[in-house]
Image (cartoon, rainbow, N blue to C red):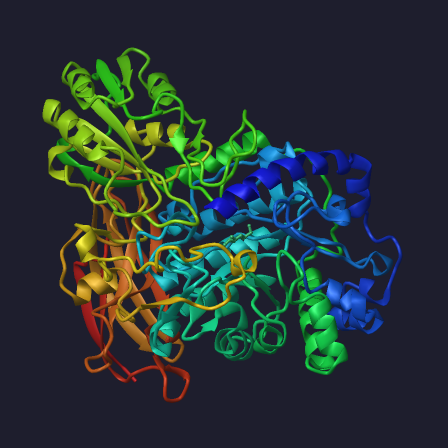
Amino acid sequence: MKIMKARGIALAVCGALAALALSAPVRAQQQAPAEEKHPWSDTSLSPDARADLVLKELTLDEKIGLLHGQGMRGWGPPKANDWMGNGGAGWTMGVPRLGIPTIQMSDAAYGVRSSGTNGRYSTALPSNLASASSWDTDAACEYGALIGRELRAQGFNMTLGGGVNLTREPRNGRTFEYMGEDPILAGTLVGNRIKCEEAQHVIGDIKHYALNDQESGRNEVDVTISKRAMQESDLFAFHIGIRIGNPGAVMCSYNAINGDYACQNSYLLTDVLKKDWQFPGFVVSDWGGTHSTVKASAAGLDNEQPGEKFFGDALKDAVTSGKVSQAELDEHVRRVLRSEFADGIIDNPTKRSVVDVEGGFETARKIAESSTVLLKNSKGVLPLDRAKVKSIAVIGLNADTGMISGGGSAQVDPPGRGPTKWQEHIWFPTSPLKAIVAKAPNAQVKFDAGKDPAAAAALAKSSDVAIVFAYQWESEGMDLPTLSLPENQDALIAQVAAANPRTIVVLETGTAVTMAWVEKVGGVLEAWYAGSKGADAVANILFGDVNPTAKLPMTFPLKDEDVPHPTLVKPAPGSTGNRPSQLTGEAKPTFGVTYDEGLKVGYKWYDAEKKPVLFPFGFGMSYTTYSYSGLKVTPGADGTTVTFSVKNTGKRAGVEIAEVYAALPAGTDEPPKRLVGWSRVALGPGESKEVTVNVSREYLSIYDEASSGWKLAPGEYSFLVGGSSQELPLTQKTNIQ
Ligand code: BGC
């Protein structure tokens, strides 16, 4: 914490210096297109061929320059060349004489970071977990494209977004930055996001590779897990994401896995990523996550960030003394250059422009609408009928002005104020109260911040309906002590609901929540961290202008004790905790977490352990209803075709996310079922459609440790189809060889 605070103060000082130094003409000069033609300017050549041509021209110093960062504001003392940075998390030196640009990196989990410090503007999209609730690859694409455009408009050509750590530990403070608990859903969505981000000519990134599944002691924790378990869960999400998105970079994580830090773990970086998956891009370290020169280089780390402690002079010395071979050095450099060509940052230099604010709002609202999950709607309390509702109580801290956002390096700075402090609680200016007033101009709408539950309950009692906006803030660098709501909000909701059963709870959370009060309230809407236009999206759903479609990408357990590790494993008191060891001098794991739940991540755990849950994975309601029929399962050489019909049995149009699960043959030692596909089906009232989902053999396979490969177990498979992981009306068995 202290170091982080110091980082904040240094940031402010250096920010002021940098603001003076970063004059517009200099910035423009940095990004000037390479006018001179070089052999590698020929765009008909492959990225590999072009990288090879550049490589031949580079001096040793130029090569080393491509393999490490040049610092980050607030990370160590200011440097003479700080003026060449772009106010992002880091940058890597280019080779101007050969037309190779600097790589300007920015965090961009749900929007571009550091707008406050840099005097720029960024759209805040709904959190990554929220966007995963849409199960929508097109929305993921729009999400990535928007961030790609805003990065380039601000002079960045590399994103540090793309978080896809699986939700093994729902109290992980970064759960909102990831895509939930299922590898196929998470990997597919992150891949589509990256693909469209890179189409804007930024180097894409996927992170944090791998198993950085809790924040407590993230720089000191050694994760113990079997190869099969990691391959079929956490690594599988990365593999799918990498195949679909082709990111230029993979960020290795802070933690150690089975004894070796991720950024010097040759199993992860070389055996799996570079050999098995044939990943052609470069591995960039998490900030301060590099721990050695020779070992990290041999294991497959290509680029150290944000500094040069191990991959600067130390790497140069290692090369000149023969401890790192010339070929190994060239391999790192080739990978960096290849990504620069493949993602088009050399052919398409960034051009500063004004961010499309209105366009950003539109995208943020649309994605929020398709990300908000209706969890409970008893007696049709929703949608609200604006012709009938005469009085509305809007209750909740800041529900008059804003909605909470997720903190840490993902934080997007809100418009109208300066830089945010590390782990500050930021309420984004999107006002639920105003949005509700706009929807119901003839109703009397009154606000109560909810600090005194009795007063809030009195207001609820005298109103037709009460809407409580409840929040749970989380951030990088911490984990939640519990999944229940903080700040006495459980008591607030219980009292309000006791006063008026027509109480609707709108949740602004970064992960699952337990709900002691759920039986007492009329409705529950999970809005997550809803971004720049969250309140408008929520109001559109509350008043029925938008029919909710989203479904949970993670299980909501009944109670904390039901998660695989009821007690979060933490480092010993007084340890360096979650601070990068480059700042603390420590470089050894000091404690361990054993993921002995293995393959049973998320719903697979609750299924296997037969534990009832509050809301299951894949669950989400609509203002209409759907029925399923006519399942046909046809195995084939290229995979299994699953066909069925979905009918809209209600009175309004909607989109149903139809889910397909498979149960593997007995004796495979697998959890009861896994998600193997889904389809978003748009249906008018009364309309029925036949849906086909193709399930690849890979999605039915298991990882065989003995042969270090994937195998399909011949035998009887069951396919289950329906609207959530626990509502699967259609089942068919089939034999697959
Ligand atoms: C985070 C990364 C982030 C980096 C740069 C690290 O603390 O773990 O996700 O990209 O900082 O800000």
Q: Is 311 situated above or below 202?
A: below
**Foreground pick, 176 / 345:** 176
Q: Is residue 425 left or right of residue 618?
A: right
Q: Nearer the viewer, residue 401 or 131?
A: 401
Q: In the picture provided, is 388 more to the left or to the right than 162?
A: left
Q: Position of residue 339 (x, y in %)?
A: 66, 63
Q: Position of residue 492 (x, y in %)?
A: 19, 28
* Residue closest to the eye, 247 or 470: 470
Q: Residue at x 29, y 26 (%)?
A: 396
Q: Which residue does the image show at 51% across and 47% down from the upper left?
A: 3
- Relative vertical location of residue 82 with respect to residue 345 in this rendering, above or below: above
Q: Quadrant of residue 312?
A: bottom right
Question: How many callouts does the rendering have?
Answer: 0
Q: Residue at x 69, y 60 (%)?
A: 340
Q: Quadrant of the C terminus?
A: bottom left
Q: Is the residue 245 above or below the residue 331 in the image? A: above
Give left or right: position of 149 versus 590.
Answer: right
Q: Position of residue 325 (x, y in %)?
A: 71, 82
Residue at the limit of the structure toward the right, as seen here: 36
Frontmost residue, 179 versus 676:
179
Asked if residue 593 is positioned above or below residue 625 in the image, the reply reads below
Answer yes or no: is residue 261 visible.
Answer: yes
Judge from the rendering whether residue 650 lies leftward or rightward of residue 356; answer left or right: left
Please indicate, yes or no, whether residue 333 appears anywhere in the rendered image.
Answer: no
Q: Residue furthest bottom?
A: 706
Residue 366 lies, in percent from the top left, at 44, 37
* Quarter of the figure with residue 306: bottom right
Q: Residue at x 49, y 74 (%)?
A: 268
